[in-house]
Image (spheres, helix red, strand yellow):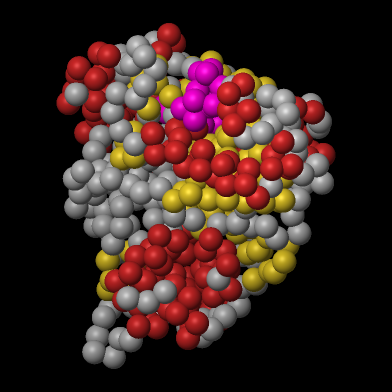
Amino acid sequence: MYLGIDLGTSAVKTVLVDDAQRVVASRSHALTIDVPQPGWAEQDPAAWIAAVFATLDALKIDHAGALAAVDGIGLSGQMHGPVLLGADMTPLRPCILWNDGRSAAECAVLEQRWPALRRITGNKAMPGFAAPKLVWINEHEPEIFAATRLVLLPKAYVRLVLSGEAIEDVSDASGSLWLDVARRDWSDDGLAATGLSRVQMPRLVEGCAPAGRLRNDLAERWGMTRRPLIAGGAGDNPAGAVGIGAIQPGATFITLGTSGAVITPTEAVTANPGRVVHTFCHAIPAMWLQAGAMLSAASCLAWIARLLGASEAELLAPLGARPAAPSQVSFLPYLAGERTPHDDPNARGLLDGLSHATDRNAVVQAVLEGVAFALADCRDALTDTGLVISAADAIGGGSRSDLWLAILANVLNIPIHRLAEGETGAAFGAARLARLAVTGEAVASVCTAPARTATFLPDAALAAAYAERQPRWRQLYRPR
């Protein structure tokens, strides 16, 4: 039996997976985001621990026997947020999250200090990454920076609490801008550019490697008969890739969660930082992930639902399963800034083309289309490197919508596949990494692809209509 724990931005989700890779049980616990100023986003690491413990306590109540038989625990988590620990190994301040844009100016400082940054990390310095946040803290909170003895990413902090060990996997470390992505090791030059050294960083492992054991007292708390092994784990997107078996070159997938991305595995680093393509180590050895990422995806639908005072299901129901034509309204989904291809934390959303005739359906469809157009920008940034994307699997909460996947298929003009268990995502992938760490099995034998439950094909006329619309949609963006 294996546990997968995913520390998301909006919730912690824990799944219990048996030896046949069936999800026996799942529990989640909601999280909130603090916004001290517009464009900022923080969370208290103590809330993460409380949420993780709450999910495991709940599983013990309903599935005590299965929980007792757990052999391994896998961790996945939101990427990029640094947790700064003092000499007593407790957090010195709230974690600055991946969608926080305060360190835009520090990105330029960091690239000036370290001219080789893009070549070594495979990425452009952006406010979402961890390193610019440390430059900001050093400038604005120097006493906290001076007191920092250890820097961990979110799931590594959870591991520290669960096991007492400071260990990070290379996929999550890729999102720090401190990793030499090709060598899969910390860059001393990168750390020095932020005023840090290896002494303040956790030990690195592969995602499927052993990385500590659960503390005795916690194993007793949850009635476990032995101390489960904890795997290296992964950042949320690499863990999601493991969960759907995207472990071979060309196995492209699209995430429609709070944020969104177009991600494809590669056997070598294929960087394109100039177009804001993210280059990360995969959670399995000798593989990498190339990603075009957007900051607001399914969260855009949640936003319009709040604005209109209706549930998401109520908004989608009148639109049917397939668009008849593009909406006359256009929507920029940059509600929290944007990454690929703009790298603009100050970008904001926009509704264009409103008239007296505009109704709710036109606005809701425009929101779905705006996200799809932004994902097409991500796809195009990836294909600029020579990658070929001829189809994609869709995962995440947004993949439940037939209409959204039909729009995606037509905007990208490729088949889009819905997967069985497409929403278990990162937590399930984390459980698979736990199994690999415990058993040493071949990656390919464990990380198989789920069945495709539906395929959405582009319609030639509709795809042409969206292709005509996209250039006008792109012209709506203006740097602020």
* Res 129 → quadrant: top left
* Camera sees residue 332: yes
Residue 7, image x, y percentages: 50, 41
- The magenta stretch spans which residues? 157-177
In this figure, what is the number of numbered marks?
0
Residue 56, image x, y percentages: 58, 41
Q: Is residue 170 magenta?
A: yes
Instruction: Name the chief secondary structure element in magenta.
Output: helix
Depth order, front residue of 196/29: 29
* Res 190 → quadrant: top left
**Residue at the (60%, 78%) spot, across then down:** 459
Note whether 254 is above or below 458 in the view shown. above
**Residue at the (54%, 26%) spot, across then down:** 162
Residue 215, image x, y percentages: 59, 22
* Res 143 → quadrant: top left
Residue 189, image x, y percentages: 40, 13
Quarter of the image with the N terminus is top right
Q: Is residue 101 left or right of residue 373?
A: left
Q: Is residue 452 left or right of residue 178?
A: right
Q: Is residue 422 magenta?
A: no
Depth order, front residue of 193/238: 238
* Camera sees residue 244: no
Depth order, front residue of 91/306: 91
Note whether 134 is above or below 235 in the view shown. above
**Residue at the (34%, 39%) spot, across then down:** 43
**Residue at the (53%, 61%) spot, across then down:** 397
